[in-house]
Image (cartoon, grey):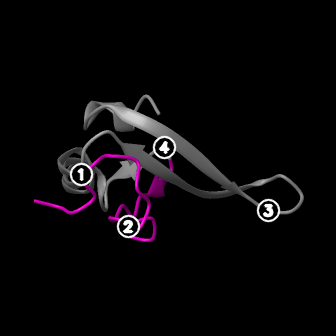
């Protein structure tokens, strides 16, 4: 959360884990506004964090979710 908050206001972070509870090495970071997610991709995609290269992309799977915020990218 701390690293990705440099791109904008992080609303939620979901860490992906195996059935055994171990980290899968990936997470979903949800921002307050779509523009912040675009900023995160620009800042972090293909950058190194600790000993790994990150792959950061826009996830549109929750596009149909209606929580009052616009989901379309600018």
Distance from Cα at disc 4 to Cα at disc 3: 21 Å
| Residue position for label 4 | 50
Tag 3 secondary structure: loop
| Residue position for label 3 | 18
Distance from Cα at disc 3 to Cα at disc 1: 28 Å
Tag 1 secondary structure: helix
Q: Position of residue 29 (x, y in %)?
A: 45, 48
Part of the protein shown in magenta: 51-74
Numbered circle sitting on residue 63:
2
Q: Residue at x 39, y 64 (%)?
A: 55
| Residue position for label 1 | 34
Mark earlier in primary sequence (3, 1): 3
Q: Position of residue 66 (x, y in %)?
A: 40, 56
Mark earlier in primary sequence (4, 3): 3
Q: Residue at x 22, y 48 (%)?
A: 43
Distance from Cα at disc 1 to Cα at disc 2: 11 Å
Are the residues tagged 2 and 4 within 8 Å (C-beta)?
Answer: no
Residue in front for this viewpoint, 52 or 55: 55
Distance from Cα at disc 2 to Cα at disc 4: 31 Å
Mark earlier in primary sequence (4, 1): 1
Mark earlier in primary sequence (2, 3): 3
Specify whether residue 34 is painted magenta.
no
């Amino acid at each position: 959360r701390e690293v990705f908050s440099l791109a904008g206001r992080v609303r939620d972070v979901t860490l992906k884990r195996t059935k055994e509870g171990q980290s899968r090495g990936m997470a979903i970071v949800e921002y307050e506004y779509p523009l912040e997610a675009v900023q995160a991709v620009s800042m972090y995609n293909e950058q190194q964090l600790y000993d790994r290269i990150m792959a950061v992309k826009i996830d549109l799977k929750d596009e149909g979710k209606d929580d009052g915020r616009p989901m379309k990218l600018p």
